[in-house]
Amino acid sequence: MSDRQPGFATLAVHAGAQPDPTTGARATPIYQTTSFVFDDVDHAASLFGLQAFGNIYTRIGNPTCAVVEERVAALEGGTAALAVASGHAAQVLALHALMTPGDELIASNKLYGGSINQFNHSFKSFGWNVKWADATDPSSFERAVTDKTKAIFIESLANPGGIVTDIAAIAAVARKAGVPLIVDNTLATPYLCQPIQHGADIVVHSLTKFMGGHGNSIGGIIVDGGSFDWRASDKYPMLSAPRPEYQGMILAETFGNFAFAIAVRVLGLRDLGPALSPFNAFMILTGMETLPLRMEKHCANAKRVAEWLKARPDVSWVSYAGLPDDPSHALAQKYLPRGAGAVFTFGLKGGYEAGIKLVSNVKLFSHLANVGDTRSLIIHPASTTHRQLTDAQKTAAGAGPDTVRLSIGIEDIEDLLADLDQALSA
Ligand SMILES: *Cc1c(COP(=O)(O)O)cnc(C)c1O
């Protein structure tokens, strides 16, 4: 054994996992149980009082889910993490620890469509007010700051247009405002980008996408960067004020640089309840073991498809940060040096009708609403996810009538190009 720090691929396979101490099982077992027996009354009391770490009830923690948490924290370079039932649950719980009614959140205007809905509608009913800033202009975030701002939320690589956000510049705005920067790192994964290294305080993921990677399980996670000083102001009472149900404990004082991860578990997950199932945790863990291999192939295939589309006479534009003349290319070289991901959009000269024809004629690509599967996926947003919007609204959302979104899988590139070729020529 040596003291060397393990590399990313080693952590993807091993972080958080050991052979099972009672059976010797080498793969992490699925601890399919709701609850865990206490050693004795004192043990139970110390678990409930947060004086000892241990398992009580699967809504609050589970040993299979704990391996996911340790592994993703290691891959992101965070101090601790909390796995939850979905990416959307991760977003709600992360913000629940920070926001009270009347507070403001500044969010990038280039987010996953589901997040835009969640922020505009459900968050509004919590009294959380969202101010939208321009993803490509860090000064627009600065202009949106008020004394009610509690957090800034961006995506590292934005879904669906493949826009790369200047994380360090927006982290500087957050630091100056005294609020944490939350980065949704779903499309990049920590293999391509580690936002905490660039100044993010909290990272969230939909594990449903590339992290699990096989299109079989919904999950999400919140990673604590350990960098934010929750006691620097009185803005974050959940972390900095005494908690009545925990004998007046101040979480930021007791748990230091992983207090946020504790708060989202013992207050957020405990009370709101979106726990990850141990079975999904097992599926996601198995998927994560091959994350580096898959991301290499996803990125190499995506670049080839983007180049191939760009050279076609029936394609009017391709928005992929991996192409040298793309507006996001310089930021991609800084933040995503190993590849620009595998989700991007392009435009068809034939407009709406050509988009419908393409998604109807593909055979290997699957026409569905997901990304980050081993399989290649295609969707025509104007006729599906963005159908209810006007043409002007569609175009503003990056989903104009001619726009097609691809999530490139890990199949043989020749087969992917042949399928697109036959569908475009049909
Ligand atoms: C899918 C997705 C989400 C939501 O995750 P779910 O697991 O579907 O709840 C959030 N952000 C991004 C970037 C996504 O792609």
Image (tube, rainbow, N blue to C red):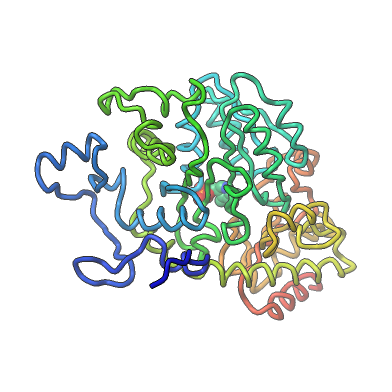
Q: Visible in this render: residue 288?
A: no
Where 412 falls versus 349 (above or below)?
Answer: below
Q: Residue at x 47, y 67 (%)?
A: 4
Q: Is residue 4 left or right of residue 18?
A: right
Asked whether 113 or 389 is in front, the reply is 113
Q: Quadrant of the C terminus?
A: bottom right
Where 200 falls versus 299 (above or below)?
Answer: above
Estimate the x, y position of residue 243 in percent, counting from the top left.
Answer: 32, 25
Q: Visible in this render: residue 76?
A: yes
Q: Is residue 67 left or right of residue 330?
A: left
What number of labels is visible? 0
Asked whether 159 or 240 is in front, the reply is 240
In this view, the residue farthest toward the left is 40
In this view, the residue farthest toward the right is 313
Asked whether 108 or 195 is in front, the reply is 195
Estimate the x, y position of residue 173 in percent, counting from the top left.
Answer: 68, 33
